[in-house]
Image (cartoon, rainbow, N blue to C red):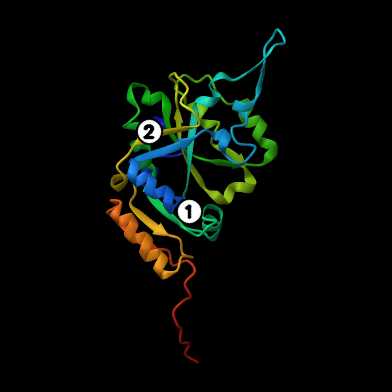
């Protein structure tokens, strides 16, 4: 599946990536045994999906929008194992879980469920972070007519330099069939095969963490569940004078 990887190399398939969900959302994933991607128009950054929102000007002066812009779906992960910013941004209520997988496992989970057009519709790529002034040039050079689908997918892998701390990797699906399927695309997964571990929010108290650990185990997750120690004070240190 090397051709499905963008801005990545073959060894990157083993690189771990991370994503934070609310605990309730993770329970839903375990119950439904599905992973879900969303249309990029639902992402918060107004520069996202820039080229696909553009107006096309035809030689006769008529205007149109790019027809396939609503056929793209994405899911954002991070190469960061853990940061304070991740928890504060994606777990505002302090009741969340950080999932771990690998780039290769995530791509395979989508690719294996995507039928005969999977080579044209399933991609994973590392986001490029560029100065704002360089972004229009990158998009103007994008080959959105590339029959392999890579050119379309690559348009979702450019962000402004100010967001470089995210270190994003994105799973991308191009739904090239009809009918329209709405703002979300889901596909079946085995959560125990896809997610290597589930790490609970470090700001939970001990009882909350124990309760959620029990709920997640009861929902069928058999892999490692533990609480992040990001905010735990260090052990007592003794300094010899």
Residue 89 picture quarter: bottom right
Give the labeled residue for mark 1: 80
> Under tag 1, what secondary structure?
loop
Which residue is disc 2 drawn over? 2
Residue at image coords 45%, 83%: 236
Q: Residue at x 27, y 54 (%)?
A: 222
Is 120 in front, or is 46? 46
Say above or below: 105 vs 120: below
Q: Quadrant of the N terminus?
A: top left
Q: Nearer the viewer, residue 173 or 146?
A: 173
- Residue 98's tag is none
Residue 178 rendering spot, x and y as whole percentages? 44, 18
Q: Is residue 162 left or right of residue 74?
A: right
Q: Residue at x 43, y 19 (%)?
A: 177
Nearest to viewer (mark 2 / mark 1): 1
Residue 16 seen from this side: no
Mark toward the start of the polypeptide (2 vs 1): 2
Q: Secondary structure at mark 2?
A: helix
Residue 111, located in which quarter of the rendered image?
top left
222 lies above or below 125: below
The answer to whether marks 2 and 1 mark residues whose Cβ atoms lie closer than 8 Å is: no
Instruction: Using the image as rendered, state which of residue 90 and residue 220 is in the foreground.
Output: 220
Residues packed near mark 2 inside 10 Å, few (<14), some (14 to 19) or many (20 plus): few
Residue 182 image offset from top left, x and y in percent: 49, 28
Residue at position x 72%, y 10% in the image: 61
Q: Is residue 54 above or below residue 188?
A: above
Residue 53: quadrant of the picture: top right
State the separation of the CA atoms marked 2 and 1: 23 Å
Q: Which residue is farthest bottom?
A: 241
Tell me: residue 170, above or below residue 224.
Answer: above
Is 187 placed left or right of 184 in the picture? left
Q: Give percent across and percent down for residue 172.
A: 46, 34
């Amino acid at each position: 599946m090397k051709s499905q990887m963008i801005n990545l190399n073959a060894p990157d398939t083993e690189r771990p990536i991370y994503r934070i969900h609310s605990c309730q959302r993770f329970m839903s994933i375990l119950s439904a045994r599905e992973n879900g991607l969303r249309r990029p128009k639902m992402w918060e950054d107004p520069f996202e999906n820039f080229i696909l929102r553009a107006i096309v000007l035809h030689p006769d002066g008529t205007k149109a929008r790019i027809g396939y812009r609503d056929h793209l779906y994405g899911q954002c992960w991070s190469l960061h194992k853990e940061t304070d910013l991740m928890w504060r941004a994606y777990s505002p209520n302090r009741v969340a879980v950080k999932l771990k997988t690998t780039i290769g496992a995530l791509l395979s989970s989508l690719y294996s469920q995507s039928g005969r057009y999977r080579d044209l519709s399933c991609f994973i790529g590392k986001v490029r972070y560029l100065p704002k002034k360089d972004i229009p040039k990158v998009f103007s050079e994008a080959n959105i007519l590339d029959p392999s689908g890579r050119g379309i997918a690559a348009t979702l892998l450019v962000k402004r330099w100010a967001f470089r701390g995210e270190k994003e990797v994105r799973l991308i699906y191009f739904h090239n069939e009809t009918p329209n399927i709405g703002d979300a695309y889901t596909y079946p997964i085995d959560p125990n095969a896809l997610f290597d571990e589930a790490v609970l929010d470090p700001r939970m108290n001990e009882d909350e963490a124990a309760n959620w650990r029990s709920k997640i185990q009861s929902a069928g997750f058999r892999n490692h569940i533990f609480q992040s120690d990001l905010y735990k004070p260090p052990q007592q240190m003794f300094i010899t004078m």
